[in-house]
Image (cartoon, grey):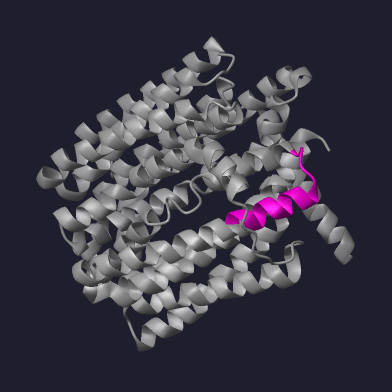
Amino acid sequence: MDNELQAGKNFAWSLFSQFFLRILGLAFFVLMSHLLGDTGMGQYNFITSFVIMWFIFLDFGASGHLYREWSKKPKTFIQIEDDFFLIFTLRLLTVLILFIPFFLVNYFSNFRILFALITFFISTFLATYINLADAYFQSANLFKFPSIRQVVEKVIVIIFGSIGLFFWPRVETVFFAILLSQIFSLFYYFNVALPFRFKIIFDGKKILVMIKKGLPFLFITLFTSLYARIDIVMLRYMGNFEAVGWYGTAYKFLEVASLFSAVLFLPSIFPTLSSLWNEEDKRQQFTDFFYKAFRIIFSSSLIITLFFIFFAPPIINIFFPESFVPSVLALRILILVHIIAIISLFFNNLLIIQQREYFSLTIVSFGMILNIVLNFILIPRYSLYGSAWATVIAEVFNLLLLQHFSVWEKDKIFITKIICVSLINVLLLFGLKYSGQLNNFYIGALSCLINIWLLLRLRVLTKEDLIFFFNPIRIKFNSYFNQSGI
């Protein structure tokens, strides 16, 4: 199948699921903020960040190695099935060992929310199995099954979570609903989608080989997770749950902003990029595909970033209680991470495809250490705003280093264009801030429109790039309508 068509079909399925996931998820998040308050939301954000950090060493990076190998498509079905359950067995043993120190630590330090922590610990373990199945489907370009699963899972969380919160407005209710949704996902994969038959496999020698190959992925996951979650955990212990709630609200919109590039686009193109890179006679196709993807990533991320900078005040004030006003400035700072982090992730994926993950490991570890140091310095003085700036600064260094160590054919004209567009917008934002017009929504809307025109005029974004995904999506929906007789 044509590379762009396959990537586009992957994107179409991801678009279907993620559109509903983000809209429904945001609506449920807003409902939670009204029923739980800023303290309850602080507890929710802390638990989701803290528990996930315990799962960093789950399979010692072996699943990251396998996803790359599965995407190359050199293995038979039997080999993939054995690898799948070998990793599952390793994860099961690791979780059983981890639960004991997890319980003891939280019994003495977080007893008030212990039940919620345990509930989310269990659901997170179930999610790791589900995510392993997702990795198999995505490596085989079967995005349909994860997409359906994600939507139904989110609907279950919202239905049971919303009803439960009206009767028992506590954070434990939310995590119980999440646990129910994970149980449904397991049932769906085992009985409908997954072609594997459940089994337990333990092969000590093979596990050691996989762990050795997966170590770079382990440390990348370790440092990336710490980098992404440590600010919320540090805010909890250096501040209070209210600050965590405000910061978590701003972070939620950073996740919403990442819908197109990080959640939809990059996973859709990873198998295609990996396949093209590993075929020597297709390097020119790889370069063309790479730059088409780069143009889309930069252009979409720039417009989304500007939108949230200009419209942060009404977004927070309309949907959240009055006590969440501090989230406005936090969102305006954090959203700067969006465009930087998306491009960083793009180059990080490139390093993994090129089997240069040791460079990625070193860079991400440096970013994590820098982020922690900056948080220690800035949180005591500026609370959640200091944490937001620490993330922005660390991400800038990440991007500079990741692109430097990636192997890519540098188009100096294109690079000059995106630097010029970026500088123009930096000067624009400074000018609007110091003239008191940053909250002028008309100027904000006009600025976004001018940027779209500028991107097209300078050919940073082309019509061919837009066709890149719209055609496969159109074909997908036309096929559906034809089959339905519509």
Q: Is residue 79 above or below residue 322?
A: above
Front-most of residues 479 and 218: 218
Front-most of residues 244 and 351: 351
Percent of width and height locating residue 367: 33, 33
Q: Is residue 454 above or below residue 446?
A: above
Q: Main secondary structure of the magenta part?
A: helix
Q: Residue at x 75, y 69 (%)?
A: 192
Q: Is residue 386 left or right of residue 475?
A: left
Query: Does 215 lie within the magenta span?
Result: no
Where residue 270 sits, quadrant-wise, is top right
Q: Residue at x 76, y 42 (%)?
A: 75
Q: Residue at x 31, y 69 (%)?
A: 103
Front-most of residues 296 and 284: 284
Query: Can I make out residue 107 in this image?
Result: yes
Q: Is residue 211 left or right of residue 275?
A: left
Percent of width and height locating residue 86: 63, 55
Where residue 280 sits, quadrant-wise, is top right
Percent of width and height locating residue 319: 35, 64
Query: Can I make out residue 441 in this image?
Result: no
Query: Does 82 lie within the magenta span?
Result: yes
| Residue at the front extreme of this rendering | 205
Where residue 272 sits, quadrant-wise, is top right
Q: Is residue 116 above or below residue 151?
A: below
Q: Quadrant of the C terminus?
A: bottom right
Q: Residue at x 78, y 18 (%)?
A: 281
Q: Quadrant of the N terminus?
A: top right
| Residue at the top extreme of this rendering | 412
| Residue at the bottom extreme of this rendering | 167
Number of marks present in the image shown? 0
Q: Is residue 210 above or below residue 46?
A: above
Please state the extent of the stretch shown in magenta in the rendering. Answer: 73-87
